[in-house]
Every structure is written in C-alpha cells, then in structure tokens.
Image (tube, helix red, strand yellow):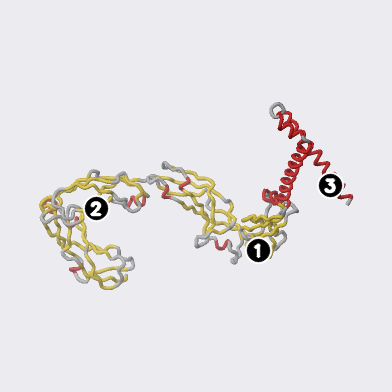
Amino acid sequence: MNKKLGLFGKLFRFIDRKIVVPITRFLMRIVKWFSNSNKTLETWLSRSNTLLFISLFLAVLIFIVIDQKMTLFTNTSAEVLKDREITAIYNEEAYVIEGLPEKVDVTLMGSRSDLFIAKQSTAKVTVDLTGLKPGTHKVNIEYAAPTGAIDYSVNPSVANVNIYRKVSESKTVTADLLNQDSLDAKLVIEDVTPSTDTVVIKGTDDENAINSLKKVATVKALVDVESLTLNDAGTINVKNIPLKAYDKDGNILNVEIVPEKISVDLEVASPSKIVPIKVIPKGEIENGKAISSINISEPNIVVYGKQSVLDNLQNVPVTVDVDKLSSNKEYKLELKKPKGIKSMSLNNVSVAISLGEASYRDIDNINVDVRNLDDRYTVQGLSEDDTKVTVNVKGVDSIIKALTSEDVKAYIDLKNYRPGDHEVQVKVEGTDSRVQYLSKKTKVKIRVVEK
C-alpha cells in the first residue's frame, strides 16, 4: 500500500512540476497582460483555487488525449496486403519452375504502429527452393516480416511446384505488324526485317510441362505501328521490340528468350498508280433512246495500295443509275475504293450523260467463256449451240456500227459447280459502256467433268 502511495506521490509531483506550474505561469502572464483593462478577470484569476482547478483541468485533458493516442497505437489490429508477388529462390540457370501461384494475400496482425511500419516496408513473399531436385515438391510460402512484433498468415501458404531441368534450343524469329490501320493511307510497309534471324529459347523439354519448349511453334517480334511516327517512304529502324513465344494455337508461352528484345527494319513505301475511272450505266433507258456520250469531270485517278494490288487494278468503276432516263442529265457520284486500295486522289466526280436515237444490231458467233471453274474440273457444251451465242447490242447507230466480235464477251460463271449436267445463265459484257448488251440465248447447257 505504501508503495502505491509513493508511486502516486511521484506522479503528482511530476504533473505539478511539468504541467501545473508551467500552465500557472502562462496564465499569470495572461492576467498581467489584461490587468490594465479588466480588473474583474484579474481578481477571479488571482484566486489560487481558480488557477489550481484550471491547471488540473488542462492536465487531465492532456492526459486523456495522450492516453487515447497510446491506446490507438498499442491495440492489436490486422491488415491484409493483397496481390503480393512471390519471389522464388533457386538456381535459375539450371532449373525451370512451374506451379507457383502468381500472387498471394498476406494478413498482418499486431499493434497499429508495427502495422504502419510493415505496410511501408518492401518485405518480400518468398519460396526457398534451394537444394531441391527435379520433381514435384510441396513448399511453404513465407513472408519476410520487417519486425518480430508482427504475426502473419499467407493465403495460400503452401504450393505444389514442379522443378524441371533447363535446356535451350534455337528458334527462327518472325515479325508481325499490329495496328496497321493507323498507318497513313498513302503508305504501306512492304518489308519487315528483324535484326537477327534466330534466338535462343530456354526452358524444359518435358512434354508434360505447361511451358515446354516442345510446344513453342513460333517466336515473334510484334511491331506496334500505332506507336511509330511514319510520314514518308524509306527504311525505319525500330529498337527494343519485345519477343514472345507462341504455341500452335496462338497462346503465349512463358519461356526465356535470349535476347529478350531485338530491333527491326521497316521498309516503308508509297506505291501508286494512275488508272481510268470507268462509268458503268445501270438500268433501262426510255424506249427509243440510247447513250450517245459519257463525259466525266476527271477521267483518271491516282490510287495507293500494295504493289501487288495495283498491278491487277485496271480501273476504278463507278455506277450511274440511268433507269427510265429520257433526257440528258448530269450526276454527282461518290467513288468507292476497290478492294485492297487504301487511298485515292478523288472522292467524287461529275458525270454528264447525253442521249441519242437508239439503234439495234446482232453480233453472231460469240464464244461462251468459262469463269471461276474449280481447277480439278473441265467443262463442255452439250451441243454446238451451247458454246456460242448471238448478242444483240443497243446504242447510237455510229457507236454500234463500229463494234466487232472482239468488243463483246459472253461467259458463264461456274463458281461452286460440281461434276454433272447443268443449265447456266449467260452473261455478256462489252468494251463500250455506252452500249447495252443482251444475249439472245439466256441459258446454255453444259457438263462439268473431272480432269
């Protein structure tokens, strides 16, 4: 009992010396400062009991605040560190590891002050595989707590890992282009040349492994065109292109690639070609009338695209509706880009159609050509009448008189036709778009046979 009284006595003297006396002195200074202006306050504050109670009140208040703060930092609490990556400790030059979870959650338990320190630390989650041989092993996942005052639990806390011996082999590198649509429409990338043809891939050759080297179908350098600034034709060197390994289904495999990144040369070109704009009338003009002339505001157009596409492009077609046309008319027509063409110098043209008196003429003995027949088959007409047709042409007299059989083509489209006898519609086209062409025999009978 005497020990407790002595302890309280020491505490009282400490509070009196460190808190009550300094506060009393401070209040006395305030009293002195107000002495000339407020005698009543001075009288009240001059009483020893008043100063004692005020000092005691402030001391208790400060004690409560400090006590609450201490309680806050000493009470046990918990924090969860989510999605922490795992560091595996093993001989990376000799082995390949599979089966470790990508991330784990760590629950920390301790005082708030210790938890605060732990959250600011860079403590790692580790798995120590040192000394383990190839095979399957059950291992513990540990957290390197920054202070011994912290308790922790890891979820998951164990893992079944497969350890394989590491091997290496060479693999050919190919390059792929991403986001080519973002490239300037007048530019094309004609060639992609990696800085190296082959790289070394490292991993396991065990077929049971998820990332076995035996599953690697290709190694690619992926060049993102959208991230490049390509304004002119020429050779562009792109550095630090990451390499990825893929299986036959296009899934990324987690194997080591040496080097991890390469550079790539892009051959940027701007192929173009000047071709005519071909006006194609569609529809039936009023009886007794025919097209005498077609005048276009821009007869030619510059097109941009891959050279292989340009080589096969003969013209840019535009269709004009002349159905029931009875007098001269001018049209504003929008041009559509042919397949494979990325850009054109014109988007629309004006076309003026003039009419004249219609005349008719038959052109005999036009051979019926075959188009789009499978290479495995051949075709023959069931009779001589099924191999040639007479084509009736309608147009202005001066135009149709100049036509020859060379200016008219009759054909049948045998796409998707199989061996057997068939009756097929005859289609006709001609070199002069001012003329209308019609086969007098609308269908022919043919036989498709295997070669």
Q: What's under tag 2, amino acid-wise?
A: Thr
The residue nearer to you, when weighing 71 against 26, is 26
**Residue linked to disc 1:** 161
Look at the numbered disc 2 and give the secondary structure of its residue: strand
Look at 15% across and 51% down and name the residue there.
291
Residue 22 percent across, percent down from the top left:
77, 35
Residue 211 percent across, percent down from the top left:
58, 61
Q: Are marks 1 and 3 in contact (CB under 8 Å)?
A: no
The residue nearer to you, when weighing 305 against 41, is 41
**Residue linked to disc 3:** 8
Query: Is 444 above or below relative to 287?
Result: below
Q: What's under tag 1, amino acid-wise?
A: Val
Alpha carbon distance from label 2 to label 3: 107 Å
Look at 47% across and 53% down and name the residue there.
176
Q: Earlier in the sequence, mark 2 or mark 1?
A: 1
**Residue linked to disc 2:** 319
Q: Quadrant of residue 63?
A: top right
Q: Earlier in the sequence, mark 1 or mark 3?
A: 3
